[in-house]
Image (cartoon, grey):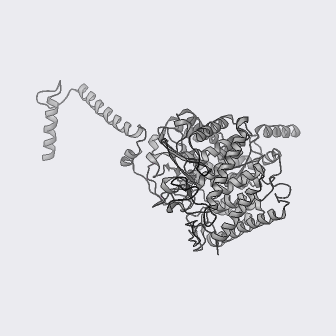
Amino acid sequence: GVGGTRVSRKLSMVFRKLPGVSASGMGLRLSQKFVFLLFLSGLVTLCFGALFFLPDSVRLKRIFLSKTEVQAVTVGSDNDVREHPKRPGKEQEHLRGMTPAKGDSKQKSLSRKPSVSHEEAEAGGKAQEDMALSRSKPESASEKATSADHHGASSDAFSFKKFQKCLLKATLGTDGGRPADPQTNERREKVKEMMKFAWDNYKRYAWGKNELRPLTKNGHIGNIGASIIDSLDTLYIMGLMDEYNDAKEWVQTSLDLNSNGEASLFEVNIRYVGGLLSAYYLTGEELFKSKAVELGEKLLPAFSTPTGIPRGVINLGSGTSWSWGWASAGSSILAEFGTLHLEFVHLTELSNNPIYKEKVMNIRKLLNKIEKPHGLYPNFLSPVSGNWVQHHVSIGGLGDSFYEYLIKSYLMSDKKDEDAKKMYYTAMEAIEANLVQKSPGGLTYMAEWRGGILDHKMGHLACFSGGMIGIGADDGAPEKRQHYLDLAAEITHTCHESYTRSTTKLGPEAFRFDSGAEATATRLSDRYYILRPEVIESYMYMWRLTHDPKYRDWGWEAVEALEQHCRVESGFSGIRDVYTMTVSHDNMQQSFFLSETLKYLYLLFSDDDLLPFEDWVFNTEAHPLPIVRKSCMQNEATEETTVSE
């Protein structure tokens, strides 16, 4: 045809100019053809190699790699906007453990499709080694744990009896933690009543759904029971045994660990894995252990990246993973990949499979190696290149629970994890030098850092830091111990002020310290309260550390405000504006209200021997995990062997 003739003419002209081509331009020598083809193939390989392996090339990859869009069945709630990932919230800040949002609050939506492809081509050497190692094992981690449970023959199998003998104190105290003081006990019973009311309405209107919508009396998003898993340990601790047994039965018969849809790695870990682990350690029910290990195994594919830094989103059914579409350049979030250590160490303990601990230790190794601006940890890191993507630092959303897990890793290791200790106190020095500020009115707060410029805003999520700094005070340098305890008290006081300065006596999502404002929300978009626990969390820790009665008084103020403004006919709901008495509810009973807010209040009004700090560390979703006493467990195993002989 005409087109073919034009092509042949052009080729003939090109060939005539090449050395060794015949005058007629009809062809090349065989050796020259080979060299020419080799050159072309090398050029193509170089171009595509650069596309796939240059750092932070995610936007280019989207052009070439198709993505599989799946219907979301995400863990968490549409309104669970903890600027953490303790959850994503406004201004694309991942609030303590949530999924991203649409519209004005860009991280609330749990139904967003993945906007960054899962790039299998990126999986580097270490990730492939891990996959090969995993495939070479004769049994999966969950199968191994289950087999050991059933046969009791493996000397490596975790023994619940040995574990109990290594606890220093009774888990639920001498009298279930019941305080002797009648007023405190009355307040504790009120919190228990609130829990039963919230649970009963969830069961009546939203059973099996992730959360209850109390105004419309229906369930919200997904059928994998976030509120059930989050409530297991709270119900057990409070002695609500009928309710606990209903929850246990649902886990046994209805918990689907193969949901095909978008799930936050962070949320699945802290909420589901953490909740199941906690339930197992409290009750000894093997059901919870096997489910936790099985679920942990499903999270491993997210780590198949060149750096071993996991991507933030995973499909539990297919094992594919990708990064949040809103995360800068396909990056992973500090508070997400940095909030796995507590649970993954326990997964290794229970399954006797080292891969879980290896995964989180690899993350720590990378963070230790890379340069940190002013000693600070920015919130966005590329899982491909291992480099920081932006220099935004926050102790609130996007960063918070990474720091929490450093000090808690040290405490949970029975103070053996010196690496975690060093990282925590070094980070605290950088935080104090760069972020801790004092307002003209004398309030101490944590500002945010954006490439060297301070943003004088503190999120509700950052209010957990009062408790974190408090529990880390005793193990700091001797000359700084009182200083840390004082700093913890000052931060907690500031967060209490954010509550008392509102009309409803509940705190806003974020509050500022500029333009004359102090501890108040100056933007309409920051005025909401979604039943968050962080301020009450710090009250509980500071009560246990100081026994100053003001913390119990402040907790009771929160109970009264919750009852007045958030309790509705069929549950509890967040409110849209804490500065008006004309309440507008958001129609969402968050699962973390059951797991954290009510649990922390109950512990605040209980004796210290209920889940004593000598034996237990709380994960970032308030699920208690035991301190790992390896030497004790080994001694118990030796004694058992001796007796049997």
Q: Is residue 538 above or below residue 166?
A: below
Q: Which of the pair 493/272 is nearer the observer?
A: 493
Residue 517, given in percent of the width and then of the height, sits at 54, 56
Residue 2, given in percent of the width and then of the height, sits at 12, 47
Count of marks placed on residues = 0
Quarter of the view holding residue 533: bottom right
Question: Which residue is painted at 40% across and 42% down in the image?
Answer: 57
Quarter placement of the C terminus = top right
**Residue sitting at the far left:** 24
Q: Is residue 242 magenta?
A: no
Q: Is residue 9 visible in the rendered structure shown here?
A: yes
- Tell me which segment is drawn in magenta: 112-118
Q: Is residue 193 above or below residue 261?
A: below
Q: Is residue 109 visible in the rendered structure shown here?
A: no
Residue 352, given in percent of the width and then of the height, sits at 69, 41
Q: Which of the pair 285/243 is nearer the observer?
A: 243
Left/right of residue 33 with respect to residue 461 in the rendered view: left
Q: Is residue 32 above or below residue 332?
A: above
Question: Which residue is painted at 78% across and 52% down in the image?
Answer: 547
Magenta span: predominant SS is loop
**Residue sitting at the far top:** 20
Left/right of residue 471 with respect to residue 515 in the rendered view: right
Q: Which of the pair 89/306 is nearer the observer?
A: 89
Residue 626, given in percent of the width and then of the height, sits at 74, 47
